[in-house]
Image: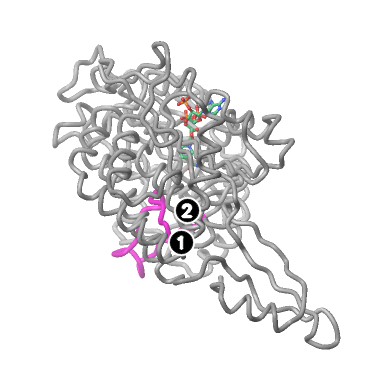
Amino acid sequence: MKTLSSYLKGAWVCGQGKGATLHNATTEEPIAEASTEGLDMAGALDWARTVGGPALRKLSFAERGAICKKLADAIVAHRDELLLLGMANAGNTRSDAKFDVDGASATFAYYAELCKSLGDAHYLVDGEPIPLGRSSRLSGQHVLVSRVGVAVHINAFNFPAWGLAEKAATAIAAGMPFVAKPATSTALLAQRMFEVMLQSGALPDGSAQLICGSVGDLFDHLGAQDVVAFTGSSDTAAKLRGHRRVLEKGIPVNVEADSLNVAIAGPDLEPGAPTYDLFLSCVVKELTQKAGQKCTAIRRIFVKAEQVDTVVADLTDRLSQHKVGAPTLDEVTIGPLSTAQQKADALAGIAKLAQEAKIVFGGPDKLTLHGADASKGYFVMPTLLCATDGDALKAVHSHEVFGPVATVIPYRDGAHVIALAGRGEGGLVASVYSDDKQFLQEMALGLAPFHGRVCLGSEKVAGAFIPPGTVMPHLLHGGPGRAGGGTELGGTRGMLLYMQRTALQGFGPYLEGLASVGKKL
Ligand code: NAP
């Protein structure tokens, strides 16, 4: 069985003891082990701060972009090998594995282009000079410079490739070295992708390190210039935010956590219309892709009360065309969940939702498998529930079932559906499907306070619409409240976590000279 090593202080190293075991999600066979016991986490942070940071900060944005370009190319060159690892370890179908691995290379490629456009500058300039007196002698100017610490990246199990890449790309672009810690259960793909990145020769010494297994005492050694970017459950997020060292040193912690994402069918939708079809296909895509293990997957489907029966029938029809089973088979569209714990949590979650809403498709006792041994593997049937009274629901608005599970909920009018969506207490993405301009505008502004992203689907964009669960590097990823309050990606916006915004005050012409050498945000 493979032992997953970590890459710290310029060398591949293994921890002592047996460590955690990784499994094949279809067969439950153990496939690797990872331990970090006894590894020098303090030394790793120091190496990043003293070697990696200075090396990256010396480079212009364009030169950092060239690194991202080489990393994207290296991942593309090893694509097939990486896809197979995703299929074995994370239970991905080939299509799901592509979503993860191609998402990783595409994000590096995007930041490569963005950095190229930022040119020879080393820092960003925020806004215009601000006169501070009657004349322009004394003025103010905001600038953003790289933090001189290390970025700690902690990722969830569901995107071992993309999760590592999206945080790494923004940190490199901003000039900050990183230590990445993928979730242990799916670290096989993350570790190999990191190895491929290193072998590209693009990464300056100290700019990138990898922890496979627990973080050990790493948090005890964080310093005031360091940053943490975390993706995972709100329980872990709360622990990390409350870590003594994080509190004492005022260390920024960016959190991407749980979310009960909504899809809203407009009251104008007619069965057979392109926008209605778009709504159905987005809902089914988000329920089934990666077996629903996406932070951006649709969990609550809002439909006008009188349309509920039609929508349930149409969704049921489409879901019944999907096949659950061995992710290596071409006809299978839904693989297993990634771990035994995820399966147990998803089944418990369905039971919880079923106390408030009726199961209308799937359910724990309806599993039909294709090409897989039913006594093994972490399979969950796609499950659709339907509620009758959205206001009376509690678990449906608060409990994220991290699997192929969603609930249809009736609404009365625009104000009602906005209030119901808000019961999720903050989400990553909402999507609305309507050809009524007034309704779309009401939804866009009404949903915005509760969501990091709002996707407006209509006939005008039906042919080009990107399903809401797809995170784009150009646009912000993150959401308020339950979703963690974080912001990742979104071009330069994602880089701001790794940079200090400072107000400079002084002689106007001096500041203008300084601003002219930076790149305007
Ligand atoms: P998790 O248990 O919180 O684990 C997330 C990461 O935190 C893993 O790398 C885990 O490492 C690490 N971790 C756990 N305890 C830690 C500690 N005390 N100190 C430092 N690191 C620690 O979450 P999960 O089960 O992997 O992920 C599922 C959740 O993530 C879902 O609720 C989902 O909504 C959320 N999610 C959010 C997004 C988003 O972008 N908003 C994306 C994906 C998932 P080990 O694996 O070694 O335990």
Q: Is residue 473 visible?
A: yes
Percent x, y of residue 125 = 60, 71
How far apart in space, not on screen, are marks 1 and 2 (Cα)? 7 Å
Report if residue 353 lies within the magenta region: no
Res. 295 image quadrant: top left
Q: Does the residue labelled 1 lie within 8 Å of ligand 1?
A: no
The image position of residue 19, as x and y in percent, is 41, 15
Residue 16, image x, y percentages: 42, 14
The residue sitting at 36% across, 56% down in the picture is 67
Reply above or below: 111 against 218.
Answer: below
The residue lying at 80 percent from left, 80 percent from top is 138
Q: Residue furthest right?
A: 134
Could you tell me which residue is drawn at 48 percent across and 43 percent down?
A: 178
Q: What stretch is highlighted in magenta?
A: 453-476
What residue did someone put label 2 on?
A: 55
Q: Please, which colouring scheme is shown?
A: one colour
Mark 1 in CB contact with mark 2 (< 8 angstroms): yes
For residue 514, above or below residue 272: below
Q: Which of 142 and 436 is in front in this view?
A: 142
Whether 473 is among the magenta residues is yes
Residue holding disc 1? 59
Element at label 2: helix
Task: Report whether 89 appears left or right of 302.
Answer: left
Label 2 neighbour load within 10 Å: few <14, some 14-19, many 20+:
some
Q: In which quarter of the image is the C terminus?
A: bottom right
Task: Say what amino acid the circle numbered 2 marks.
Answer: Ala
Give percent across and percent down for residue 349: 48, 24
Relative to 456, residue 516 above or below: below
> Which residue appears at 50% of the width and 70% of the height?
121
Q: Quadrant of residue 115?
A: bottom left
Q: Residue 314, can we see it? A: no
Magenta span main SS:
loop
